[in-house]
Amino acid sequence: MSTNSWADADRRAAELALGVELNALLSASRALTERSAAVFHPGVQPAAFHVARWLYAYGPANPSAVADAVAMDRSSTSALIRQLKAAGLVESTPDPTDGRAVRVSLTPAGAERVREALDLRGTAFFERTADWSVADLRTLARLLHDFTAPGGGGTVHPPEE
């Protein structure tokens, strides 16, 4: 086998190993989201937690903007907002700039439930990285940033000392 063939095989093996680890990361993330959603409110669909997290991070918005931001269709987002309203976690108010439209926002109880669920996520995350060095945390953050940058495959930066 030529040197190029060995390098190609080595790269392919590394890419496959990366794929395995990314699948494991996505699976762990989904499982943690399910647990977080149950902490948020066991009576609403897990996707509703995604909507509530967005409202927590960005504040009141009209339902169509929320749907666009969380990459869900408007009818699904409206159904989730109805669930959240029925649970007392979200409220609707008239849009101050357009009296025909409404804005949705978290109620104080909704914001508190999001904080509780995010605390669970943070605890689970920090438990996994508690023994990591600051340099390793920075390296992973930088590589993930490069991997997820728009267009994918951004510039890989050298490790920081």
Image: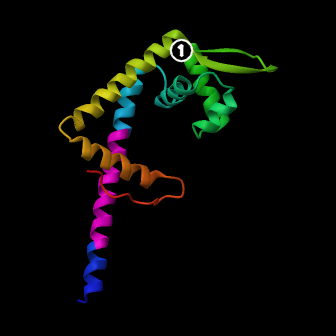
Give whichever of 83, 139 is nearer the camera: 139
Q: Quadrant of residue 11?
A: bottom left
How many numbered badges does the structure rendering display? 1
Residue beneath disc 1: 89
Q: State the residue in front, 63 or 115.
A: 115
The answer, for residue 48, to whether it is visible in the render is yes
- Specify start and end residues of the magenta stretch as a single range: 11-29
Q: Is residue 75 above or below residue 108?
A: below
Is residue 41 visible in the rendered image? The answer is no
Q: Image quadrant of residue 97?
A: top right
- Vertical position of residue 73 compared to residue 105: above or below: below
Q: In the figure, is residue 63 to the left or right of 142?
A: right
Q: Position of residue 134 (x, y in %)?
A: 25, 41
Q: Residues within 10 Å of mark 1 (few under 14, many from 20)?
A: many
Q: Position of residue 86 (x, y in %)?
A: 57, 14
Residue 14 belongs to magenta span: yes
Residue drawn at x 46%, y 61% as measured from the top left: 153
Left or right of 136: which side holds 144? Answer: right
Q: Please determine whether, in this image, residue 13 is positioned above or below residue 99.
A: below
Q: Amino acid at mark 1?
A: Leu
137 inside magenta stretch: no
Residue at figure coordinates x 30%, y 85% from the top left = 4
Under circle 1, the secondary element is loop
**Is the magenta region chiefly helix, strand or loop?**
helix
Residue at horizontal 76 percent and vertical 17 percent from the top:
96
